[in-house]
């Protein structure tokens, strides 16, 4: 039995039915079925000439994550991901974009693929700093972000 995910993000798809959550507890979940939130952060923010503090970068990633989750609060995958019954089940993968241009390119790719996400833009400077994908099954997102390295 498949439960369609709801289109509640500003970048949600017109047809979110392709983003489904298997509703069958009898099946063991595979690595691809695990609900994951991907966060992509600009690595260049921590280097010269920008030299942002790690705290500022982490805060922006937190803002993007919360915005992506909040925009899909009715989504069964988001509800499973944020379930108070098992907070240790959250899986997050943090990836690095090398520049503002790469981050915008990733946001465009996700938009073109109709994958709900939130691009965080620091105000008032209007600087895109990171993006967070709405939590969903790994297999729906990973192929589109495979080229990125882990943020270290």
Image (tube, rainbow, N blue to C red):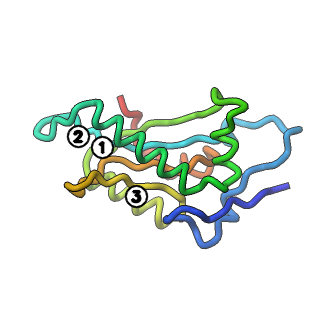
> Count of labels shown?
3
| Residue projecting furthest to the left | 49
| Image quarter hosting the C terminus | top left
* Separation (CA) of disc 3 from disc 1: 12 Å
Q: Secondary structure at mark 3?
A: helix
- Up the image or down, 1 lies above or below 90; here it is below
Residue under pointer 3 = 107
* Separation (CA) of disc 2 from disc 1: 6 Å
Look at 70% across and 42% down and name the residue there.
Answer: 80
Q: Are marks 2 and 1 in contact (CB under 8 Å)?
A: yes
| Place of residue 10 in the rendered image (x, y in percent of width and height, measured from the top left) | 50, 65
- Disc 3 residue crowd, few under 14, some 14–19, many 20+, Cα 10 Å: many
* Separation (CA) of disc 3 from disc 2: 17 Å
Residue under pointer 2 = 45
Look at 64% across and 30% down and name the residue there.
Answer: 87
| Place of residue 26 in the rendered image (x, y in percent of width and height, measured from the top left) | 89, 38
Q: Residue 49 appears in which quarter of the rendering? A: top left
First-in-chain label (3 vs 1): 1
Residue under pointer 1 = 42
Side of 41 where 33 appears, left or right:
right
Say which mark, if any, is on residue 99: none
Q: Residue 48 appears in which quarter of the rendering? A: top left
Q: Secondary structure at mark 1?
A: strand
Q: Is residue 20 or residue 75 the one in the foreground?
A: 75
Q: Secondary structure at mark 2?
A: helix
| Residue projecting furthest to the right | 26
First-in-chain label (3 vs 2): 2
| Residue projecting furthest to the bottom | 14
Look at 35% across and 37% down and name the residue there.
Answer: 59
Look at 20% across and 36% down and name the residue there.
Answer: 52
Side of 150 where 92 appears, left or right:
right
Q: Is residue 61 or residue 97 the one in the foreground?
A: 61
């Amino acid at each position: 039995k498949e439960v369609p995910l709801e289109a509640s993000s500003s970048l949600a798809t017109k047809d979110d039915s392709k983003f489904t959550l298997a509703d069958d507890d009898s099946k063991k979940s595979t690595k691809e079925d695990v609900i994951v939130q991907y966060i992509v952060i600009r690595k260049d923010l921590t280097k010269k000439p920008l030299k942002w503090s790690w705290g500022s970068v982490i805060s922006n990633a937190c803002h993007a994550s919360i915005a992506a989750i909040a925009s899909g609060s009715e989504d069964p995958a988001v509800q499973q991901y944020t379930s108070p019954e098992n907070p240790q089940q959250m899986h997050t993968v943090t990836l690095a974009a090398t520049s503002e241009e790469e981050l915008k390119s990733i946001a465009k790719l996700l938009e073109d693929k109709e994958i709900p996400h939130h691009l965080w833009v620091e105000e008032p400077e209007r600087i895109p700093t990171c993006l967070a994908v709405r939590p969903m099954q790994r297999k729906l997102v990973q192929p589109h972000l495979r080229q990125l390295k882990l943020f270290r």
